[in-house]
Amino acid sequence: MFKNLSIIFFILTSFSLSANERHYTLNIAKGSIQVGEYQVKDRILVNSSLPAPTLNFIEGETAVIKVINKTDQKTLIHWHGLLIKNDQDGVPYVNSLPIDPKSEKTYRFKLRQTGTYWYHSHVMFQEQDGMYGAFVIRPKNQQSSHIEKVVLLSDFSRETGEQIERNIKKQGEYYDVLKGTVQSWWKAFKTGNAITKWRNSFQRMEGMDYADIAYDHFLMNGKPSIKLLKRSQKKEKVLIRIINGSASSIFKLTYGGQYMTVVSADGLPVVPIKVTSLPISVAETYDIELEIDPEYSYELKATSIDKSGYAKLLLGSGNNLKEAPDIYWEHPIGVTMGEMMGMSEMGFFSELAMNYRNEFKDVPRDTSYSVDDQYRLPSMDLLRPMMKDHHEGHSMKSTNISHRIMNRSPELRENNILDKDKGIYKELSYDLLRAKSAIDVSSGRKLRTTQFTLNGNMGRYVWSINGRPLGPETYIKIKKGERARFIIKNTTMMNHPMHLHGHFFRVMTSQGKWSVRKHTVNVAPLDQVVIEFDSDEEKDWFFHCHILYHMMGGMTRIVRYEDSPGPQKLEDARKKSKEFNHADSFFLRSRNFVQSNYYRTETSFFNSFYAFDLDVVGDYNTNLEGELHVSRILTRYLEPYVGVKTEAEEGSFKTTPTIGFTWVLPLNISVDLKYQPEMEDEIELEFESEIQLTSKLQLNYEYSSVRNFYSELEYRQTKNLSFVTSYNKTFEEWGLGLAYTY
């Protein structure tokens, strides 16, 4: 009898323990998948699906997730936005070792939050190749009459992530050719933006675009278009959990109804705000409420920020379709630097000075800290250093100085209010988001302030923080018990969605102590953002740009609790890992011209710090000039070098060491000034440039104080092959030929 009671008690006890756990098994394997019209192979899939399965939990449960790695690669899963123990966070060599091939790992963590989150691999380019899924935590005893749906946005390419990186390393505008977004002088004249293009060229801005990659499809839940609620019978509200799980694509959402009501940001509730356009950067999540009428079907469209494509959702069952409107947008060819910052009144010389200041912020430097004994909210001068005025709360004021999420079109810069009486805004901005809990200003915590810059070199496709790409020991140090403030200055023309693992931070805006809490903030081009959080964890946490190719390019740091760092074995493993030494990886690019009058090659073998460059030009007789030099990539425009140069004229050779530098001047003219002591002309000055005449035709020229000049008209037939006609003054010949880039 006693024995039977013991068995019953054991079974009941086991049931109550397991009832508070929810188990999932995730099988990671390579496989093929159909996306739209494309069948692709060798993608890394979770449970054979794209995206990975949605994981559903209830607040307070313990997640028990077994991950079985059936591939021949290492892998690991990060639980994006979850507040969990450090060793469960899932970043290789930061808080755990990766899962080896043909091995498995079981994650176990208690869920102490609710909301919309997601998960993905943090190993090399596996996220781009298919390893991402939704993670939803619902409140205990939830009683909601709303219908809920999860929509996971992503980007799809037939190329692997590794292939994409190689392509953009070879040529920053590689995918502009495929997208047809190459910015030419013909397009500038045609659209009435020739003066703006000249202005931007003078400030050394190349053909700007809003996105780097050309994708084959943009997806919702793994498909270019989906349908939900096919049998709606009554007027009702629908809650859509939106997740941007793309590798590098930023979207704007528009809806066929009157507006979208944002009720949650990055999983946490906010005071509801009505907007007609919802920008969502990489890794952000928003919950939105939509009103539907059974007489209509409604379109919800996610358009890429560069307008190269979209994914769409059809909601409802009515016969009458309400299409989503086009996004607020401005063609980048007509945008000045000031307008990009939301300051159309910014003068030409102010823009020019800023361009040079930002360049020299690329020079590597240490991270600076300061500690104050008493916490104070940041001043508006700090939040908007070039704009003194501000507005509070949700008061309907006509203003152009709101904390933008990303690039804004003219109608948004002028006035972001759509309907003052109904409280509807045109587009969401961070200062429209109001948290439901306030900062404890009187907490007595010390304030540690860290300032750093986000830096980028599009020519070499190198991304960094304070001029230093990620390495095994690149830290931002904080201290437990303090309040941390990061002042982040974006010195580049690109958006950077910055994500901090294991924490929620306040994006400080004019909402003051009610500023929104998030885990990811998009730092818009040339913008400054201030974030704050209580330092209440321990060990090491990842902080990085969530555009995959910027993260892999080096825009990443480890946030270290200096009084309780992570295990030494992980620090040692970082020094040997591919991820933390990716900045040392070398890439090859080469442009080769074979023409009837001369040949030339421009070949570069480079990593994030150094470049080995070989330049050769010669005719088919006995005239030749070749130079090999090693340069230090110091800024996005400046590269000092040392090398050796050989000249051959009528069979007579001369060789000399060289020392010099290349630097990009206004109008994107590259100057090369060198000292060559063994040559008759000890100082040589060269100017060269590429002028994009049309989307496929460009003029290349080079002038040398020693060799006269050559000029070429290059017609790009494909992304690799070009037809060329040229004149070389040194050889005094016209010619025709081919060029090949790889």
Image: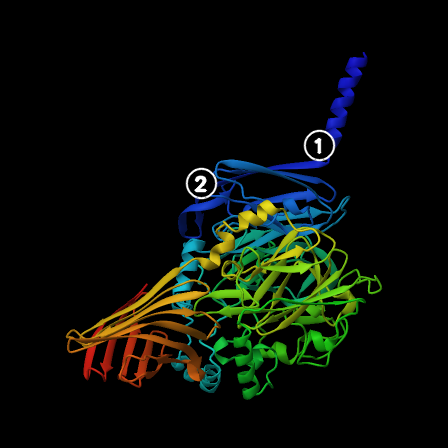
Q: Are marks 1 and 2 in contact (CB under 8 Å)?
A: no
Residue in the foreground of this view, choosing between 232 and 506: 506
Which color scheme is applied?
rainbow
Q: Residues within 10 Å of mark 1 (few under 14, many from 20)?
A: few
Residue, far top: 1
Q: How far across and how far down the image is residue 379, in percent? A: 75, 75
User: Where, quadrant-wise, is the C terminus in this rendering?
Assistant: bottom left
Q: Residue 343: name its quadrant.
A: bottom right
Task: Name the residue rendered at 40%, 48% in the picture.
Answer: 39
Q: Which residue is mark 1?
A: 18
Q: Position of residue 525 (x, y in %)?
A: 57, 72
- Element class at badge 1: helix
Taking 138 as reference, is 243 left or right?
left
Return the x and y of residue 708 as percentages of the image width and height: 27, 85
User: For residue 72, which numbered disc appears in the image?
Assistant: 2
Q: Secondary structure at mark 2?
A: loop
- The image shows a total of numbered marks equal to 2
Tell me how far mark 1 sits from mark 2, CA to CA: 33 Å
Which residue is depicted at the point 41% across and 80% down?
Answer: 187
Say what amino acid the circle numbered 2 marks: Asp
Residue drawn 40% across the image and 70% down it: 631
